[in-house]
Image (spheres, grey):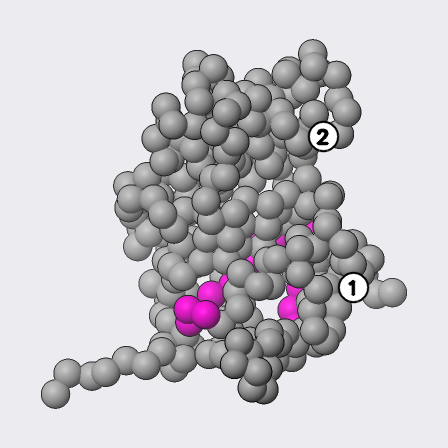
Amino acid sequence: MTEAASASVLRFSAIQQSFASPTGDAPNVVISDVGFEVKRGKFVSVIGPSGCGKSTLIQMAAGLLKPSVGMVFHHDREVTSVNRTIGFVPQQAQLLPWKTMIENIEFPLLLRGMALSERRAKAMEAIKRVDLAGFESHYPYQLSGGMQKRASIARMLVYKPDTILMDEPFGALDAQTRMVMQHDLQTMLATEGASVLFVTHDITEAVLLSDSVVVLSRRPARVIAEIPIDLPRPRDMFEPYGTPGFAEAYDRVWSVFRSELNIRRAA
């Protein structure tokens, strides 16, 4: 095995995905021959038109969906069942409404059989990392949308996964909260050293957060470009055009992505 191959943490190989048609017609092909990888310590974003199968790829990496054709590998092992070693932040926070914030965050450790004192200490550490100290006893309905999302990220960080899947985690947040969360995510990952696969519709978000951007075509999806983002870190989430090279990187991604959109030009 080459050094480059051994550095691959997550790999999609010749992925195809079809779903049965509700009318009994030919299967609906969503993904067609998609392949790319996430290398150790890298942040890779996936963008593409709505409905092209971006979230489907996340589900495959998490072991929640088996590809119709092809294989997904995590640390060179094929993902064939629920991937319990990976961190997953879904579109919605999905906190348990009957548990307090700290109980939600320590829940993965409870499932692993960790003693109360140890898991409580680890949960408190994660809470401090996402700047939610003082809200440990609050229930989800008592937290803002941004705070719920921070709690969701803390719940993922609490067991220190080396690979993180994020499926449009900030899509439901207002613009100001989204920028704050992007900034905080960048800061947290700088110390975690995790590998990240991130799905988004937002090109600015993809360019600011990523080491590379994978662009998918319209359905049935295929990879039409993998664009490296070689910008200095840390990057300014609040004033992106203040980051040297941002405009050029954005234009490279947009010039590829726009070809997959049905844009009607004004007469």
| Front residue of this view, candidates 47 and 183 | 47
Instruction: State which tag comes first along the sequence, 1 or 2.
Output: 1
Q: In screen coordinates, is 49 left or right of 242?
A: right
Q: Position of residue 209 (x, y in %)?
A: 47, 51
Q: Is residue 137 depicted above or below 97 in this figure?
A: above
Image quadrant where one finds the C terminus: bottom left
Disc 1 to disc 2: CB gap under 8 Å: no
123 w.r.t. 54: above or below: above
Q: Secondary structure at mark 1?
A: helix
Residue 120's x, y, as percent? 63, 16
The residue pinned by badge 1 equals 5
Mark 2 — residue? Answer: 111
Look at 65% across and 76% down and name the residue there: 16
164 and 209: which one is in front? 164
| x 60%, y 74%: residue | 19
Whole-percent x, y for residue 109 in the image: 69, 27
Disc 2 marks a residue whose amino acid type is Leu
Read off the magenta span. Answer: 34-51
Q: CA distance from mark 1 to mark 2?
A: 33 Å
State the residue at coordinates (44%, 22%).
Answer: 139
- Magenta segment's dominant SS is strand
Residue 15 visible here: yes
Tell whether 40 sits left or right of 25: right
Q: How many marks?
A: 2
